[in-house]
Image (spheres, coloured by chain):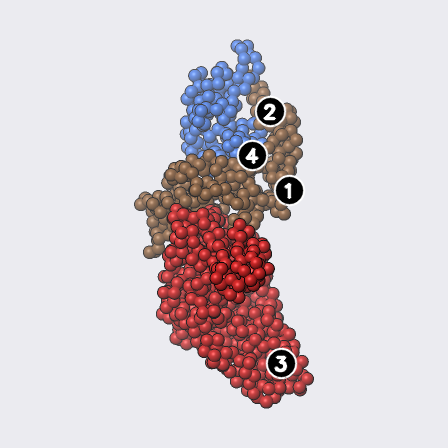
Chain colours: A brown, B blue, C red
Amino acid sequence: MERRFKINDIDVKARAGEHLLDVARRYGFEIPSLCHHEALPPIGACRICLVEVAWGGRRELCTSCNFEVIEGMQVTTDTPAVQHHRAMNLELLLARAPGSARLRELAAQYGVRRTRFGPPATSPLPNCILCELCVRACEQLGNHALTMVGRGDKKRIGLAFNSPSEQCTGCASCASVCPTECIPVKDTAAGRTIWGQTHPLVLCKVCGAPVMTERQRAKAIAKKGLPEEYYDFCESCKQSTASKRFASIVW
Amino acid sequence: MARRGRLVIKPDRCTGCRTCELACAFVHSTGGLLGLSRIRIREAGAGPEGDRHLQMTCLQCIEAACVKVCPVDALVRNEDTGAIEVSERCIGCGLCAVVCPFGHMHFDRMLGRPIKCDLCGGAPTCAAFCPHGALEVR
Amino acid sequence: MARIGNAKQLAEYRKQVKASKPESRKAIAVCAGTGCKAFGSFELFEAFREALARHELDRQWDLRATGCHGFCERGPLVLFFPDGMLYQRVKSSDVDEIVQTTLKQGKVVDRLLYTDPQSGDAYIKERDIPFYKHQRRLVLEQNGQIDPCSIDDYIALGGYSALAKALAMGPHRVLDEVERAHLRGRGGAGFPAGRKWKTCRGTESDKRYIICNADEGDPGAFMDRSVLEGNPHSVLEGMIIGAFAIGADEGWVYVRQEYPLAIERLELALEAARAKGLLGEDILGSGFAFDVHINRGGGAFVCGEESALIASLEGRRGVPRRRPPYPAVAGLHGKPTNINNVETWANVPLIVGKGADWFRSIGTEGSKGTKIFSLVGKVNNTGLVEVPMGMPLRQIVEDIGGGIPGGKRFKAVQTGGPSGGCLPADKLDVAVDFDSLTAEGSMMGSGGMIVMDEDTCMVDVARYFVGFLKFESCGNCTSCRDGLERMHELLTDITEGRGTDETIALLEDLAATVKATSLCALGTTAVNPVQSTLKYFRDEYEAHVRDKRCPARVCKALISYTIDNDACTGCTLCAKRCPQDAISGQKKGPHTIDQDKCIKCGICRDVCTYDAVRVE
């Protein structure tokens, strides 16, 4: 089923059930967002991707990431109200994550160069804006190691029962998707340290460079069905081996 | 399938000048960080006319291990160019770079993303800049 | 307990029950609602039982422990049938006198009657007491009459006849009837129940659910609790009728863990209804099957929001999601789900039994029927009241509530729970219905009603409610989670004397964003206490920031206690009671308060018999 509607007076088409932000971005409209990720279910946490939507005599300010498209609606992506409320929510987030360059840059675009609010009372993870991308990525991977803990102003990202998780594979996808880069990951000879535990690493069979964590390897082998030796070498040694093989064919 | 041409590598013409690496790095990153180049020149020993070099870059495999291992279907083949591209769906788990049998993918921990050749949307910059005709688009 | 096979057998069974308990039979109904229980009604009930046995009156008098009668201020309450006499604040030690005087001689024990504190008039019958006289008790009517643990009591008063009628009508006529009655959801949003039911029925699916939302979380509200505790079968009958009309075969009651009595009585009701063939397979021989499970909520306020409630029921975190899709289309486990609150379900048997036309005759154009409120705060008659929609606020506060205690002046009333607005005296004539309250910046909510007197600081009130809501926000939205926390900080600044005009301006600005950009109703309504007090009591905010003065003398940072030398007799009582030893002075000489030591607890003022302690 197809849905036709207008974004900033331009005709667009989408599939029924698609979310507005995805459609708008496909058509090249710029809508800022901090908690959206194409591969993860939208939750509307950051409240930055606000747009104004009018349909059936109603007019609503809503987040576009979790808004299912409606036939015949009129979307405006940059009204004064949208700008104003985006700025206020950015100012609130800036107080949480003053260390995030990406957030500072985005806030500055909305005229917010400093925040009138102090650091939040509860924030065990500095610069975390509670967008839950890490939690959703971890769920998507089927690991379910990360979770939201508490509610209201006490809400935080954490591990179940506050103890190192047996589910965590140390894959660091959480750190990869984090918009404020606030999740610490440390790779040393001893292993990868993340979320309160150090994961032993699989080392390259040729040079001994770290390849991945043992848990991530075990899980990938069990799940993905590729031969085990696919997980044995570092990028550089694989390329070196391959180049030698290619050379023997060419010359 | 009407593809816009493929990248053809001619190792015997490569002099190892690394112009391709530089061109790639400038196209794909601000400041031309060589570490972010998707093509790499490897030394392949000495031949009768001097040192040999090989240009290593993604082969855009038909049954690609990277595509198979991705948990979120983020690696998508561009039907126009034939390139396997890293889409916005990527959550940065790094498995693709681990399993690529040729080491053609590099996982960049700072970016939280894998780095791989996307054929520049059908017109590979490396080929355009290669002064010796060692990279061609056919 | 035999199964009742069909409507005819139900009617016969009702006759039997009635014959064994004729309405003319004398009965004593001891309120066993939570309020009266706290006052000792359990002991009172036991004392009655023992006394009736001792005096061999237990064959003449039927003794019942009933649900909440509503007049909680005056508990424990004892109601006598068939004449409807009410004794209030009855203690176990009164039982012997009641037996001797009332039961044996038929005379009234005057001191146990309700006496109006203002007029001094005593009332014998419950229905004549002003608190009850102005009410229209439909949902609560049977609360004082039946033993909530007895399905027979409910059946005797016509219980489950609406279900039999609905089964005969067929689902579509029931849907039409509920839609025509214009029953609006009592949980807060006031969405037309009939429309919701029809949407749910009209959504193609192999399975449908219905849910009863009994996650009543408003501080000081106990409407749903009292209905579940006092008349669980009325809610259950409503759910069965709803399930039949909608085509659902499974239902859930999501009830707070903090309501153990409601859970216990509901469990009893479910068992009794199953045994009688009114729940489970082949209900009343109609072939229709439906059963109900109970789920205990973990105490998160936000789980009263329907999408959060469903998430919680599915075993996930109670976090609201964007609607649409509405639960009626995709709810529990993705199936069409109809969710209504306790009071809405309890209205259903009345509508089906007495007809939509009867229901429509009560209330206003846009809001039909009655609404139950928890009337609490600075009002003489606190308790549970049920009034027809459209009654002016003033009548609820003054006539039913009996006005403000201690001769104080009325200041504001907050309707709709913690996220309701505070309406001032000049809004007292507003009609209490869904649309009028919303138009004035407050809301119906689920029916909390808190009365405030002149000693209440409106800034402090706003700060209290924002504090509650910032704690209870699920924390998903930046605007609600961070916005409310920051609003609470700003309000604290104002009450502690650090506020400026800019603080007020930022507070207003922030409130607008929280309201406009939060996902669920918790966030969008959370600013009501702030916006309404800013609208109606702005002078109080300004006094706090400009004059550093709290007009109601509540905000500790802005007040100081002093002793009036002329009035002080030097009795030393205040000095003895001061927890900080901040008061000094010679016996029979004037005393003074050391401001550096004073923590402004107000004990000196409370204990002073000469009214010598001043607050500025």
Amino acid on which disc 1 is placed: Pro
Instruction: Tell me which chain the residue with mark 1 is part of.
Output: A
Instruction: Tell me which chain the residue with mark 3 is part of.
Output: C
Percent across and percent down for residue C317 are: 55, 52
Residue A136 vs C460, above or below: the answer is: above
Amino acid on which disc 4 is placed: Gly
User: What residue did someone put label 1 on?
Assistant: A164
Q: Secondary structure at mark 1?
A: loop
Percent across and percent down for residue A175 are: 54, 37
Number of numbered callouts drawn: 4
User: What residue did someone put label 2 on?
Assistant: A237
User: What residue did someone put label 3 on?
Assistant: C95
User: What residue did someone put label 4 on?
Assistant: B94
- Compare residues C599 and C542 and report the one nearer the observer: C599
User: In the picture, residue C571 is in which quadrant?
Assistant: bottom right
Percent across and percent down for residue C24 are: 55, 87
Amino acid on which disc 3 is placed: Val
User: In the picture, residue A83 is in which quadrant?
Assistant: top left
Residue C360 vs A154, above or below: the answer is: below
Are the residues under badges 1 and 2 in a single subunit?
yes
- Label 1 or label 2, whichever lies nearer to me, is 1
Q: Is residue C361 left or right of residue C48?
A: left
Point 61% across, 74% down: residue? C41
Instruction: Tell me which chain the residue with mark 2 is part of.
Output: A
